[in-house]
Amino acid sequence: MKIRGGRYTLMAVLAGALLTLAACGGSGDAGGSVGSGGSGGSGGASASWSTVASGTTATLAAVWGDQPGDVWAVGVNGTILHWNGTAWSPPVSSGTTNALFAVWGSASDSVWAVGDFGTTLHWNGTAWLPFSSGTTNTLLGVWGSGGSDVWAVGNNGTLLHWNGSAWSPASSGTTAFLKGIWGSRTDDVWIGGDGGTLLHWNGTTWSSVSGGTTTTVLRGMWGSSEIDVWAVSSSGSPALHWNGTAWSPSSATGLSSVWGTGPSDVWAVGANGTIQHWNGTAWSSSSSGATANLTSVWGVGASDIWAVGANGTILRYH
């Protein structure tokens, strides 16, 4: 796959990833087909997944919010959408046509979006403004413990840290493409990437941790605590779970993103509208009513969850 100037081409990052997902499917413990309508897991007795109009056909790569009426979705061509509690707005001016692959914030007036060519945009409550990242490598993930402690990861082992004033490079010790990042606190952060790469930050140094595989593409990460962390794979390999001591495989495969409210309420999404739910014991399929590849999942609470994906697809569990 050709890289120019340290950049994944748009086809390589999103189209390629979505094709991988489509090839892998997205089965879990309970099997079950993805049909129309239908209820989900234990998030809410009367809640179900339904389609919400996005007003765009652009592929959406990530979703994150600060509260029920303040949710952001980002995607290709610099697309940024905002949910105000009633509807998704027409695309907000991002000032870029570069693809955006991840979004995360510490407050309603402090949100980061990162993407192609090392793009880093910051929402200050009024406008999205560009900041210099110091790299032209594509950035694929972003997470922080607060406004002055934010990490961004990407191609070729790219690892950046925001200290509240500027982005600076950090050594990851790898050249693998880094894609997923999540932490429980400032001194407990996990990164997942290609080749089963798993890195852990203890507040002082990054170290490599074995996940028991060198073929898995770890694309999404989320946890409820330092002893309950999930890393999901879009490569057909099992999702991995960290129990505080070691990583172990689960039966869920073909997933691109994971998020939950706690150890027994975890959601993951993937190809062809696949949505899986973990109830603390097993993964099971949840009907999404969609066939588009889903790239990201995030929620406000157990009965208010968003999933986004190809062709402007936005789903809500509510």
Image (cartoon, helix red, strand yellow):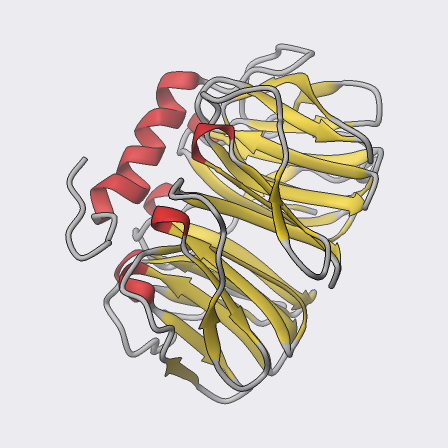
- In the rendered image, residue 65, in percent from the top left (x then y), is placed at 62, 64
Measuring 82% from the left and 39% from the top, which residue is drawn there?
Answer: 44
Q: Pick the residue in front: 59 or 167.
A: 167
Q: Is residue 62 visible?
A: yes
- In the rendered image, residue 272, in percent from the top left (x then y), is placed at 43, 26
The answer to whether residue 93 is above or below residue 14 is below
Instruction: Place residue 144 in its image quadrant.
Output: bottom right
Measuring 44% from the left and 28% from the top, which residue is drawn there?
Answer: 195
Q: Is residue 241 left or right of residue 269?
A: right
The answer to whether residue 80 is above or below residue 139 is below
Q: Pick the residue in front: 118 or 272.
A: 118
**Residue farthest to the bottom, as pictured:** 126
Instruction: Place residue 118 in its image quadrant.
Output: bottom left
Q: Is residue 78 left or right of residue 62?
A: left
- In the rendered image, residue 139, in percent from the top left (x then y), is placed at 39, 57
The answer to whether residue 70 is above or below residue 152 is below
Q: Is residue 307 visible?
A: no
Q: Is residue 177 left or right of residue 58?
A: right
- In the rendered image, residue 184, in percent from the top left (x then y), is placed at 76, 54
Q: Is the N terminus in the top left, top right, bottom left or bottom right quadrant?
A: top left
Measuring 36% from the left and 79% from the top, which residue is drawn there?
Answer: 132
Q: How many marks?
A: 0
Measuring 32% from the left and 42% from the top, which residue is drawn there?
Answer: 14
